[in-house]
Amino acid sequence: MKISESDVEYVAKLAMLEVADDEKKELAQQLSAIVEYVEKLNGLNLEGIEPTAQVVTSIRHAVRDDRVAPRTGTAEAGKTVKLFKVPKVITER
C-alpha cells in the first residue's frame, strides 16, 4: 500500500500537526516503507509459534540479588565521596 502526500496531509490534520510541503514527500515514502514491512510480516507463516513479549531469552537479569547490609551514614559516605567546588551559575536579579 502506497501512502500518498494527501494521506500524510490527512493524518497530520487529524493529529493537528503542521507538516511542511517539503516534508510530505519524505514522510509519505517513510510511511509507505513501514506499511510494506508490516504487510511483509503479515505474510509470515507463524503457525505453531507461541506469542511472546520478549524474543531474547538467554539474557539474565543484570541486577544483583537483594542483600541486607549495614546502613551507611552520611558522615561515612562523605569520607568516600570526593567533593569539589562548582562555580555559581545562577544569579539573582
Image (tube, rainbow, N blue to C red):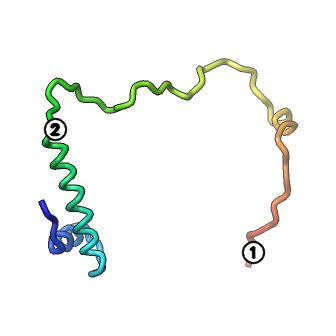
**Label 2 secondary element:** loop
In percent of width and height, residue 86 lies at 81, 60
Examine the image and state in which quarter residue 63 appears.
Answer: top right
* Residue in view at x 20 percent, y 61 percent: 32
Report helix, strand or loop for mark 1: loop
Image spot of residue 8 (x, y percent): 20, 70
Which badge, 1 or 2, comes first in the chain's sequence? 2
Residue plotted at (23% across, 62% down): 31
Give the distance between the C-alpha atoms of the residues marked 1 and 2, in whole angstroms.
64 Å
Residue 85 position (above or below residue 75)? below
Give the farthest residue toward the top: 68
Which quadrant of the figure has residue 87?
A: bottom right
Residue, disc 2: 44
> Residue at the spot x=46%, y=27% of the render?
59
Up-down relation of residue 9 to residue 50 (above or below): below
Q: Where's residue 1, x and y in %?
A: 12, 59
Q: Nearer the viewer, mark 1 or mark 2?
A: 2
Which residue is under mark 1? Answer: 92
Q: Is residue 15 above or below residue 66?
A: below
Q: Classify residue 92 as left or right of residue 75.
A: left
Identity of the residue furthest to the bottom in this view:
21
Amino acid carrying label 2: it is Leu
Quadrant location, the C terminus: bottom right
Q: In the shown orientation, is residue 89 left or right of residue 28?
A: right
